[in-house]
Image (tube, rainbow, N blue to C red):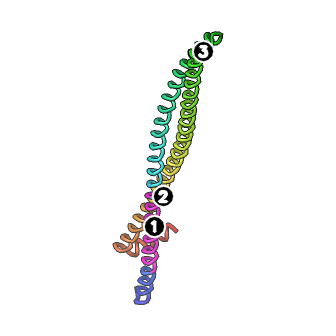
Amino acid sequence: MDANTVSSNVSVLDLICKDKYAEANNHKRARDDFNKEAKNWVNTRNINSERAKELSKKAVEAKSERDVCNEKVRELKALRDQMHAKANELKEKGGDEYDNAKSEGNRYHDEMASFASKGQLAHQLMMQCYEDADVARKLSDIAHKKSIECRESANREHEAFLNTLKELEDLKNDPFGAIDSLEDDA
């Protein structure tokens, strides 16, 4: 081999190494970007997962409140009905006893209506919390899938990065054999 051929081969080898270093750095950058994106998706997943748990807990509390109100409505309805029945029995007699029974029945009715209203509000809150929790769970699932996709992409880029480093190592150890191998791959 003459000096020009050696110099030419060294120049080609330098260019190949430069390209391989650039390729390795591109894979490394892409891998790091995918890992960063995966981390962001994991954070989004965790936030939505926690939100879903909080909303589900709030829904259970609202359901409990609704159930208490509904039980109170049943009790007050029974008392109201008793007082109205008593008032109907005393209607013909009239007087204070009739007025008191009717008044007490109306008081039970008003109290029952108040608990029914509170129960309805608790029911609406419960339903809204369950719906919002479902949305948060779906968002969490989507973020989880995205994080897995990003991690898989990061793994592919890491594998490409390692392969490129191996090619560089091969170039350093056996420059002309590595060039022949690279030409065979092309």
Residue denoted by label 3: 95
Magenta span of residues: 15-39
For marks 3 and 2, the one nearer the N-term is 3
**Residue shown at 47% from the left, 60% from the top:** 37
Residue 109: horizontal and vertical position, in percent?
58, 25
Label drawn at residue 27: 1
**Residue shown at 48% from the left, 28% from the top:** 68
Label drawn at residue 153: 2
| Image position of 162 (left or right of 121) | left
**Could you give the CA–CA distance between mark 2 and mark 1, rounded to whole angstroms?**
11 Å
- Compared with 66, 128 (above or below) is below
Rate crowding at label 3 as few (under 14), some (14 to 19) or many (20 or more) other CA atoms within 10 Å.
Answer: few
Instruction: Check disc 2 and give the amino acid type.
Output: Ser
Rate crowding at label 1 as few (under 14), some (14 to 19) or many (20 or more) other CA atoms within 10 Å.
Answer: many
Residue closest to the far left: 173
**Residue shown at 45% from the left, 85% from the top:** 8
Q: Is mark 3 on a helix, strand or loop?
A: helix
Instruction: Check disc 3 and give the amino acid type.
Output: Gly
Residue 129: horizontal and vertical position, in percent?
53, 41
* Image quadrant assignment for residue 127: top right
The foreground one among 164 and 84 is 84
The foreground one among 67 and 92 is 92
For marks 3 and 1, the one nearer the N-term is 1
**Could you give the CA–CA distance between mark 3 and mark 1, rounded to whole angstroms?**
95 Å
Closer to the camera: disc 3 or disc 2? 3
Q: Is mark 2 on a helix, strand or loop?
A: helix
For marks 2 and 1, the one nearer the N-term is 1
In the rendered image, residue 173 lying in the magenta stretch gets the answer no
**Could you give the CA–CA distance between mark 3 and mark 2, rounded to whole angstroms?**
87 Å
Rate crowding at label 2 as few (under 14), some (14 to 19) or many (20 or more) other CA atoms within 10 Å.
Answer: some
Q: What element carries label 1?
A: helix
Label drawn at residue 183: none
